Image (spheres, rainbow, N blue to C red):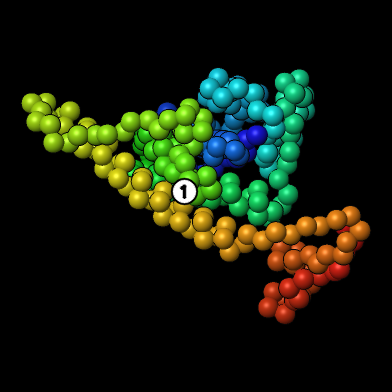
Amino acid sequence: MVTMDFVTSLPVGSSGKDTVLVVVDRLTKMAHFIPCRTTITAEETARLFISTVVHLQGIPAAIISDRDPKFTSNFWQVTWARYGTCLQFSSAYHPQTDGQTERINQTMEQLIRTNCPDRNKWEDVLPILEFFYNNAPSATTNHSPFYPNYGMDPTVLISTNVESQVPRSQQFVEELQTVRDKAVELIHKANAIARRYADLHRRDITMAAGQLVLLDTKNLRLPLPTKLRPRFCGPFKI
């Protein structure tokens, strides 16, 4: 099962792309950051997903996404039905769906900002940022996403102490080490925040049909000033 979302409004990159398709495996937390264009169609999205994710991990049992027109199109729904993939749409403002995806999107954007002073060159650093993200321990599993996928963590040792007679090679290695250090620090901070958030909101709640529940009004449009409206409304029967 994977989640799928678009991060848009990025600076136009070196190959004219301005959007990233973010795909995350819900079990292993493996993330794929795939450059594309805002104008991408449903068919182009399917082809891109197959060429970048499916060829490595196979056809997913389910795809969770928002209700972007590409994901609700007839082409998208019929195509994945033929593959036997269940399409699920995230509920608006649902923390278990929107929250996880949003945190990964924010982490990716922060990785780009901290490692790409020239904003138009974000495409060039995105693959290595994806690698470092997937090689860092997840806040949820305490393993890197690589480990449950491949049974190992890739080697990332970089030696900057070896004398080199090729200055450009030395510069290249040092630049990669800098990117790695910044990425690891940022991902560790993001994971710490995610752990605190999960611990704060982790409660075992069991609900059954016929039970009465209250609905949070935070994301409802009510004819009352925000500061005056009630926190919850209801009760409503499940």
Query: Closest to the observer: 11 or 194?
Result: 194
* Relative height, residue 57 to residue 176 (above, below): above
Q: Residue at x 76, y 28 (%)?
A: 77
Query: Closest to the observer: 67 or 176?
Result: 176
Q: Given the current orientation, which residue lies at the most extreme bottom position?
A: 228
Dot 1 amino acid type: Thr
Q: Residue at x 31, y 41 (%)?
A: 180
Question: Where residue 161 sits: x, y (%)?
Answer: 13, 36
Q: Quadrant of the C terminus?
A: bottom right
Picture quarter containing residue 75? top right
Picture quarter containing residue 63? top right
* CA neighbours of label 1 inside 10 A, class few (<14), some (14 to 19), many (20+): some
Q: Residue at x 36, y 46 (%)?
A: 184
Picture quarter containing residue 118? top left
* Relative height, residue 44 to residue 117 (above, below): above
- Mark 1 = which residue? 107
Query: Closest to the observer: 225 or 236?
Result: 236
Question: Where residue 123 sits: x, y (%)?
Answer: 41, 34
* Relative height, residue 51 to residue 105 (above, below): above
Any part of residue 102 in sight: yes
